[in-house]
Amino acid sequence: MALHNHHGAFRVPELAVPGSGHGTLYGLSFTVKDVFAVAGHRSSAGNPDWLRTHEPAAAHAPAVSRLLQAGAALRGAAHTDELMYSLGGENYHYGTPVNPHGEGRIPGGSSSGSAVAVASGSVDFALGTDTGGSVRVPSAYCGVYGFRPTHGAVDIEGVIPLAPGFDTVGWIAGSAELLLKAGEVLLGQPVSVEDQPGEIQMGKQTDAQTGEPADMRNGMRNDMRNGRQAEPHNIKPSGTQTGKQTGKQTDKQTNTHRLSRMFIPPECWSLAGQECGGYLKLGLNRLQTGSALQTAVMEIAPEGLKTWMDVFRELQGAEIWATHGAWIERERPVFGPDIAARFTWAAGLAGADHSGARSLRREFTERLRGLLGNDGCIVIPTVPGPAPLRGGDPAQLELNRSGAMMLSCIAGLAGLPQVTLPVAGPGGLPLGLSIIGGYGQDLELLSWVQEVWKR
């Protein structure tokens, strides 16, 4: 039986794939953003011309297979922004999913349907993708939990790409406990060849093509395949940590590192303003009360967050055009005005020298990974404020988008894991509070949040 679609979360509510009938996720349901390969299903990537020019998938994406094998049942294909190139959730062709916790407000994108499906109770959890904030932003706007993993930690094969040097498979849930439970499946050991036949190769690019740090893609995956905890490759810790590991505790049973240090960057918190910042600090107090972390207020972006955002946008835009430019020029798809403008801008980046931006990305990455090590975290607002109103002024929407990107680009540039937690804001509207963890510390971060946030 097809899911009800009262909140408009699903492009294909009738899509259904049963789980294995056993496993840690047995009895739970999930949906997928309409970019994941599901055998026999034709993904739209939020655009009718993409749907028209692509064939149904021959096999499930590995991330989908993992969840099915763990017992979860797939229900529906959820809406996304056009080719995932937006943070708003308003789709020119397929409409806008209704934010269940923000009447008259956008759901956020590009994993808009995934967030709404969870927030409305249609499914227990959902798969999305996060390149520039596409899981974290809609999770914050819709008042649910969302997670972007370390870049490369979850297999992204069988997923329509946007910018491979930043793309991740993320997930959304109604509780921190379920966020961790799904993470234990998605971040576990690789599915065997026998369990996952016919992997789909979609948009895969080499490090030389993307210009990303080499360890962000293959290094992380190789560490996980070899069954050891991933460490930053070729990145030296900051001077304050050289030769000693202050406050570091190791869990011998799980071979993970307990969090012991928390950093509060004032330049990030200033974006939330006084009113929303006050509500978010209640969430911060909850984190601090539930744990014994050493806390320090410290600037992480002395260059200014706009500089970080500009670096992210340039590198992301160049990859986006390298990934989709040939298809756009060949098929001449119809895009909504805002998406069309972004692709036109991205096209202008083709052939330009991006070495300066790549150099800055390496600098930012080294700084953050060295600062956090295995036991540090950064706490920031996920977005500056509540979800903007639907159909709002384009200039104001772009201002909101820029504010969200200045916050979301931090983990994106450094390839770090980030979890967003729901916090009630002004008038009961949802806000998001985020914790960024150290490189490869995904399960430790999720476990710590689940333990601390429920207290």
Image: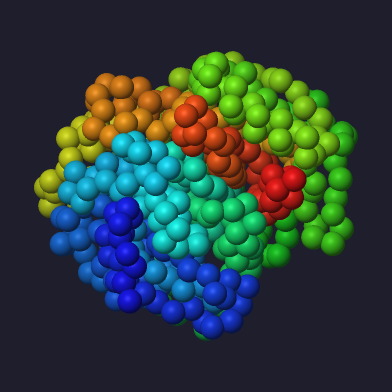
Quarter occupied by residue 233: top right
The one nearer the camera, 308 or 185, is 185
Quarter occupied by residue 405: top left
Q: Quadrant of the C terminus?
A: top right
How is the structure coloured here? rainbow
Q: Residue at x 84, y 62 (%)?
A: 253
> Is 193 displayed left or right of 86 in the figure?
right
The one nearer the camera, 244 or 430, is 430
> Is 55 displayed left or right of 75 in the figure?
left
Percent x, y of residue 128: 43, 54
**Could one spot residue 162 in this view of the protein?**
no
Q: Residue at x 68, y 41 (%)?
A: 438
> Relative to residue 194, is residue 401 depicted above or below?
above
> Relative to residue 267, is residue 92 depicted above or below?
below
Percent x, y of residue 414: 56, 37
Q: Residue at x 28, y 34 (%)?
A: 390
Report the label total: 0
> Is 134 displayed left or right of 322 in the figure?
right
Q: Residue at x 69, y 20 (%)?
A: 298
Percent x, y of residue 274: 55, 16
**Could one spot residue 2 in this view of the protein?**
yes
Q: Quadrant of the N terminus?
A: bottom left
Percent x, y of residue 449: 69, 46
